[in-house]
């Protein structure tokens, strides 16, 4: 199989992609056709050598558009072709020419006859006079200019026996000319052309929002030559992996990497949406497009320019807009049946009243043309994709990577959310919580002895104790004669004396547990702490409690999730019942599932789905993969720089911050609300004007003005999502 990318000129909405699916998709050897509306590109997958580029270009032309093959496209970089002045601005130029010709025709008609009513097309139905020749010629120019991009697509639709809005408008314009309504014919052509310009502009706005992401990463990088230490400036594409790059204060970081020298506050808002700069030092990961605010740093390049986090975000956002949302699919399916139904209705209106009720043929033919114009699904078709693209772009700016309109809509329908405890509700790293010395020992002595034994172990609890000791500035001297009791503890020699360390269970086995110690340990364990006991053969020196600390904002976030409309917040964890209960109560979760293996989390998600229908699973995208896949919506947290998390989840929260979750749900619900508003408004306007047409009130130019106004209003309503508030 082979894939070829084409730049398609004139592809700005779903109607055009449908036409291309029928013409290009029908070519022998073509397996699939995919579209990127933001880039204006079409990817054709075909059997190797089965179809030539010229045949594909010809098929695009049969659909009323033109195409240019794209050769030598760099992997991972979006393709933008200007296509010359005419390709870029031709639609606007002809629309302006059409408008000026219509205005000139109207003014000449008014001037020559001295009657405003005549100029408003009454003359076409009056026997008192005819249109002036100069006005007819000007109106004809308006029709040709306005329909220049419309008529070829209408002819293509007719050949394919597939009615679309271009065919509807063409029939209306030709019909108006046949009955002598030159002003209205030209006005329809101009206003419809203008509505298509607005559509193209709206897609351009969303396109610009995505292009803005490209400007985040600088095109040049300053890296240190390993041979002689000279500092060279080269395009980021030419900087090799492993090179050391220098970044000065105030500059944008050009590539992904790890800091090897220096420290700085880095503004990561372009990637993660975090408004507060993050302190970075040696060993920390940094991302292309982020801003070094206050310190010179050197870093080692870990990813090529085509595979940086920002490049992958851009690529995924562009791919996401091609994955059609359910509402978008519904609109497309509705329009497929709606348009031919409207043509049949118009024919019935033109024929039935004169034949059955003896009505005037001219009047009912005119009303049928009005029905055709107002029936144009332009506003309906454009409303959903513009809303989805605008919402996806805003989410990307907020550090929320949504992989398709379907997932965005699903976020707006959620009834429940299941949160993996470790790394999501908690920080994912155990820390020492309490140090309780006994039998005359001090906290420092207890911690020193525990660290001397735990320094030999790689267990998370052991690392937490060693970390606390080092944080207090105390040197850790490893115990001698170290011996581990698998799953229970360890012992060793410290200062010539034998000490052991272990769990509550080991203390009980050694029969050194008093009632008072047992009660204290149980209180801590019930609160979700793991207890490490330190003792020698003579007495218990004390114990240290270790627990994964809950995120500071977890309680407020859970409350915010419920305010956003969720019915249930659930905790999933592999920890014991006591820990799960303590964490759930602390953050205000509604229920919890404890002691879960990965397959148990999958069962828990399926159970919650059975109760609430739509449930999201929030995890790290790696260990929770089965549950993420089973949920209605899989959300990975802290995905910046984590390849697996970005690939496995439906939505990736780029920052390690759960506060993006309530924003995501509100954003999804707002998007759904705007889509529903647009669909209801577009259909409502059509029903209203159909009634006015049947009542002999609406005219052709009024109908197209209403349709254009509806298109403009739904587009502006959709673009509110682009200008809407991003996550803080």
Image: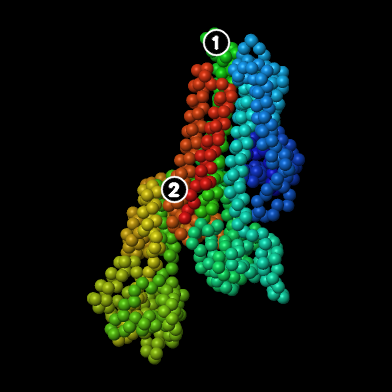
Does the CB distance between marks 1 and 2 fall below 8 Å?
no
Where residue 490 is drawn, which disc sits there?
none
Say whether disc 1 or disc 2 marks the residue closer to the N-terminus: 1
Question: Residue 519: x, y in percent?
Answer: 25, 72
| Secondary structure under the numbered disc 1 in the rendered image | loop
Where residue 359 is drawn, which disc sits there?
1
In this orientation, which residue lies closer to the viewer: 503 or 16?
Answer: 16
The span from disc 1 to disc 2 (Cα, nearest Å) is 54 Å
- Residue identifier under label 2: 666
Colour option used? rainbow
Question: Residue 597: x, y in percent?
Answer: 42, 61
Give left or right: position of 6 versus 355: right
Taking the spot 52% from the left edge, 46% from the top edge, the residue there is 723
Question: Residue 219: x, y in percent?
Answer: 66, 59
Give the vertical position of 533 relative to 561 (above or below): below
Give the vertical position of 85 relative to 348 (above or below): below
């Amino acid at each position: 199989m082979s894939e070829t990318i084409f730049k398609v000129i004139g592809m700005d909405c779903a109607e055009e992609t449908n036409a291309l699916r029928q013409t290009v998709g029908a070519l022998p050897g073509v397996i699939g056709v995919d579209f990127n509306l933001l880039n204006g590109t079409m990817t054709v997958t075909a059997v190797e050598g089965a179809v030539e580029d010229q045949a594909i270009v010809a098929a695009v032309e049969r659909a009323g558009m033109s195409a240019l093959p794209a050769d030598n496209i760099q992997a991972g970089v979006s393709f933008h072709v200007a296509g010359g002045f005419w390709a870029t601005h031709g639609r606007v130029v002809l629309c302006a020419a059409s408008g000026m010709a219509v205005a000139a025709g109207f003014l000449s008609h008014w001037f020559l006859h001295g009657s405003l009513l005549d100029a408003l097309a009454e003359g076409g139905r009056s026997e008192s006079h005819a249109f002036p020749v100069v006005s007819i010629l000007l109106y004809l120019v308006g029709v040709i200019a306005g329909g220049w991009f419309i008529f070829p697509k209408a002819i293509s639709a007719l050949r394919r026996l597939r009615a679309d809005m271009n065919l509807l408008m063409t029939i209306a314009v030709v019909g108006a000319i046949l009955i002598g309504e030159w002003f209205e014919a030209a006005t329809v052509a101009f206003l419809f052309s203008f509505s298509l310009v607005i559509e193209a502009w709206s897609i351009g706005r969303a396109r610009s929002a995505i292009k803005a992401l490209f400007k985040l990463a600088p095109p040049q990088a300053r890296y240190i030559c390993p041979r002689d230490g000279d500092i060279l400036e080269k395009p980021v594409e030419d900087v090799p992996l492993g090179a050391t790059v220098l970044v000065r204060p105030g500059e944008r970081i050009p590539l992904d990497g790890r800091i090897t020298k220096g420290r700085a506050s880095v503004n990561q808002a372009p990637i993660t949406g975090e408004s507060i700069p993050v302190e970075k030092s040696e060993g920390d990961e940094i991302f292309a497009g982020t801003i070094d605010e206050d310190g010179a740093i050197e870093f080692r390049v870990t990813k090529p320019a085509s595979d940086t986090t920002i490049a992958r975000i851009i690529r995924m956002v562009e791919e996401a807009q091609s994955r059609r949302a359910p509402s978008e699919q519904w609109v497309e399916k509705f329009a497929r049946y709606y348009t031919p139904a409207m043509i049949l209705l118009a024919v019935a209106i033109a024929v039935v009243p004169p034949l059955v009720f003896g009505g005037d043929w001219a009047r009912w033919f005119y009303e049928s043309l009005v029905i055709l114009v107002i029936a144009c699904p332009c506003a309906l078709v454009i409303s959903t994709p513009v809303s989805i693209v605008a919402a996806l772009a805003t989410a990307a700016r907020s550090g929320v990577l949504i992989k398709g309109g379907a997932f965005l809509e699903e976020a707006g329908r959620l009834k429940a959310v299941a949160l993996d405890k470790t790394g999501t509700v908690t920080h994912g790293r155990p820390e020492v919580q309490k140090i309780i010395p006994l039998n005359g020992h001090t906290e420092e002595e207890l911690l020193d002895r525990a660290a001397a034994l735990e320094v030999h172990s790689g267990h998370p609890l052991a690392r937490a104790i060693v970390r606390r000791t080092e944080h207090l500035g105390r040197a850790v001297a490893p115990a001698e004669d170290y011996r581990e009791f698998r799953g229970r503890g360890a012992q060793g020699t410290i200062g010539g004396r034998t000490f052991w360390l272990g769990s509550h269970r080991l203390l009980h086995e050694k029969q050194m547990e008093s009632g008072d110690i047992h009660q204290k340990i149980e209180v801590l364990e019930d609160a979700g702490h793991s207890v490490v006991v330190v003792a020698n053969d003579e007495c218990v020196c004390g114990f240290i409690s270790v627990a994964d600390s809950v995120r500071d904002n977890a309680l407020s976030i859970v409350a915010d999730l419920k305010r956003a409309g969720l019915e249930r917040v659930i905790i999933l964890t592999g920890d014991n019942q006591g820990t799960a209960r303590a964490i759930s109560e602390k953050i205000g979760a509604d229920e919890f599932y404890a002691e879960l293996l990965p397959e148990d989390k999958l069962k828990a998600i399926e159970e919650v789905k059975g109760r609430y229908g739509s449930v999201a699973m929030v995890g790290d995208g790696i260990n929770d993969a089965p549950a993420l896949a089973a949920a209605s919506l899989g959300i990975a947290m802290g995905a910046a720089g984590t390849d697996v998390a970005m690939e496995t989840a439906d939505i990736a929260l780029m920052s390690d911050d759960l506060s993006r979750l309530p924003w995501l749900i509100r954003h999804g619900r707002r998007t759904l609300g705007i889509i529903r508003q647009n669909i209801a408004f577009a259909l409502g306007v059509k029903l209203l004007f159909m009634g006015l047409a049947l009542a002999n009130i609406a005219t052709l130019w009024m109908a197209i003005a209403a349709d254009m106004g509806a298109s403009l209003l739904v587009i502006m309503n959709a673009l509110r999502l682009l200008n809407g508030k991003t996550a803080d």
